[in-house]
Amino acid sequence: MIRSLFTILILLCLGSCGSESSDVKNAVDEANFLLTGRDCTGARSVLDGVGFQSNNANYLKAYASTYACEANYTTTAFFANDLTNLNATASGFFSSLAAFSTSPLMTSATDEDFVKLQQAIDTLLYAGDISNSSSFARISVFGAKEAGGINVQALYMVLVNFGRWLSFYGNASSAGVKGVGDNPEGNNCLFTYDTGGPNFILVNDALNDGAATSGSCNSTNTPYTGADDISSGTAAENKARLCQGIVLFNNFIDLILNLTFTGTNTGNLNDLSTTFNSLCEDIAAFGDALCELRDQTECEARPIEDLEIYSAWLFERNFR
């Protein structure tokens, strides 16, 4: 009798566990179907209906896609319109991102397209309830195959949102040229650098080689002034917006170093890892682990002087 009851309980448990897994799978399938019709909120509602699955890779990829859908992003459009235009050289990469077809969509610091796509990115970067973004941490939770899928999806979204950030704050033209766009203030730089700051000599050194090195943000085209949205707010607001770009780029570095791309439709992605890992190594002497700042809160905790050095030496000198 006891053995029979035990067997029944085991069967009931297995049945309920299978049903729960089936519910999640069905929800993911339905959400992906709704996303093909651009029903962004409907897809997320279906996923919310089975509870947030923080350790289910397929669920998380679909959940991120609901925010990306609201942000006017699709991987299909990214491949069709922008990936083949990606420039893998240090001097051309940032401009090519700013020239993406989706980059002009960011029109303010609180632009919904940017904010929603960042929600999608964060869903993937912190998959598995990890507290600090890293490819290694995601692999440790999901294994190499599933983490690889998450990381690829995150990489494409990071490239698009970083392109929006560069275009908006860099006052870029439709061709991705910094400082010649439509911003009313006509800013030449991504950020307004403190000319009285303790580390300004390092910033000035970075921008002192003229337009051939740092584009419109150079010592012959002063002041070193960024867009109003990254210069006229409080010090905390300005730092937070600078950190958005730093965190996006640092996560790009971490992702690209841990992925290998195959096929004819992946552009120059494999060439990017060597180029930009080297750039991060070049600025290591100016600040401890600046290229390791992959979390917004951690970045905002760093002194602004460190972040200005990072921005001048890495962003301004390579975004022209």
Image (cartoon, rainbow, N blue to C red):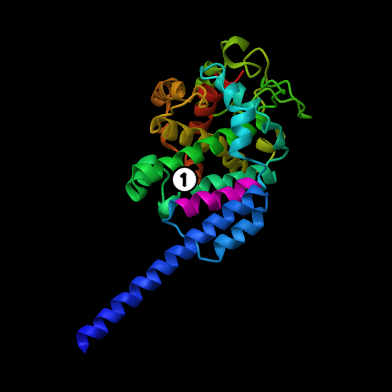
Q: Is residue 192 visible?
A: no
Q: Position of residue 141 (x, y in %)?
A: 35, 50
Vertical placement of residue 48 versus 136, above or below: below
| Nearest to the observer: residue 316 or residue 54 | 54
Q: How many marks?
A: 1
Residue found 59% across the figure and 10% down from its top: 212
Instruction: Please indicate whether residue 4 sits to the left or right of residue 217 in the image.
Output: left
Q: Position of residue 94 (x, y in %)?
A: 58, 24
Instruction: Please indicate whether residue 18 sits to the left or right of residue 178 in the image.
Output: left
Q: Position of residue 33 (x, y in %)?
A: 60, 52
Q: Main secondary structure of the magenta part?
A: helix
Secondary structure of residue under mark 1: helix
| Nearest to the observer: residue 239 or residue 113 | 113
Residue found 34% across the figure and 74% down from its top: 13
| Nearest to the observer: residue 201 or residue 186 | 186
Please tell me whether residue 62 belongs to the stretch shown in magenta.
Answer: yes
Q: Quadrant of the N terminus?
A: bottom left
In the image as oriented, which residue stretches furthest toward the right?
184
Residue found 52% across the figure and 36% down from its top: 248
Q: Type of residue at label 1?
A: Leu
Q: Position of residue 301 (x, y in %)?
A: 48, 44
Residue 17 lies in quadrant: bottom left
Q: Quadrant of the C terminus?
A: top right
Q: Is residue 180 visible?
A: yes
Q: Which residue is mark 1?
A: 125
Instruction: Please indicate whether residue 218 sits to the left or right of residue 205 in the image.
Output: right
Please tell me whether residue 91 belongs to the stretch shown in magenta.
Answer: no
Vertical placement of residue 47 versus 289, above or below: below
Tell me the magenta residue range.
Answer: 58-69
